[in-house]
Image (tube, rainbow, N blue to C red):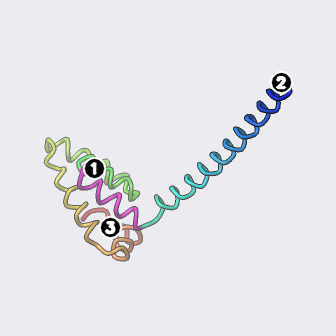
Amino acid sequence: MSEENNNLGDDIKKGAEEAAEAAKEAASDFANDAKEIINSQENKKVIAGILGIVIGSLGIHKFILGYTKEGIIQIVITFVTCGAGGLIGLIEGIIYLTKSDEEFYQTYQVGRKPWF
């Protein structure tokens, strides 16, 4: 009976190690896929557009596109105007989402147009 318990314990340990290895591989694959999604231009367009519409007053959509200075300016404008500056983010979010992928890429990634 003791030998059966040892064999059962070894089988459980082996199964746990295999499961851990499979989970590690799945997590690595997921992380790689997530990096590809975040770095793709189309998804930058969608993410920046949605963030511009939802929380454009914080300028996060600017930071997503790599416009740090403009993002900080957006935050300052929002505070100075008591939130009315958030309309800029709303307008930009709508503009981002209505442009074609190629036009968005050429305008905001290649051309580096920071406003509207």
Q: Secondary structure at mark 2?
A: loop
Which residue bears the numbered disc 1? 73
Query: Mark 2 or mark 3, which is nearer the start of the sequence?
Result: 2
User: What whole-number distance in Å separates the C-alpha atoms at marks 3 and 2?
Assistant: 75 Å
Q: How many marks?
A: 3
**Image coords of residue 99 (percent x, y):** 28, 72
Determine if the magenta segment contains residue 49. yes
The local secondary structure at tag 1 comes to helix
What's the residue type where badge 1 is placed? Ile
Discs 1/2, front: 2
Quarter of the rendering containing residue 114: bottom left
Q: CA distance from mark 1 to mark 2?
A: 74 Å
Residue 39 lies, in percent from the top left, at: 48, 61
Q: Residues within 10 Å of mark 2 (few under 14, many from 20)?
A: few
Label 1 vs 2, first from the N-terminus: 2
User: Which residue corresponds to the image point at 77% horizontal and 30% vertical from the top-left?
Assistant: 9
Residue type for callout 2: Met
Residues marked 1 and 3 touching at CB (< 8 Å): no
Q: Residue furthest front?
A: 1
**Image side of residue 11 versus residue 86, left or right:** right
Q: Which residue is mark 2?
A: 1
Q: Position of residue 93 (x, y in %)?
A: 25, 60
The residue shown at (41%, 71%) is 110
Label 3: state its secondary structure.
Answer: loop
The reply to whether the C-beta atoms of the residues labelled 1 and 2 are less than 8 Å apart is no
Check disc 3: other Cα within 10 Å, few if <14, some if 14-19, many if 20+.
Answer: few
Which residues are drawn in magenta?
A: 42-56
Tag 3 residue: 113
Magenta stretch holds residue 11: no
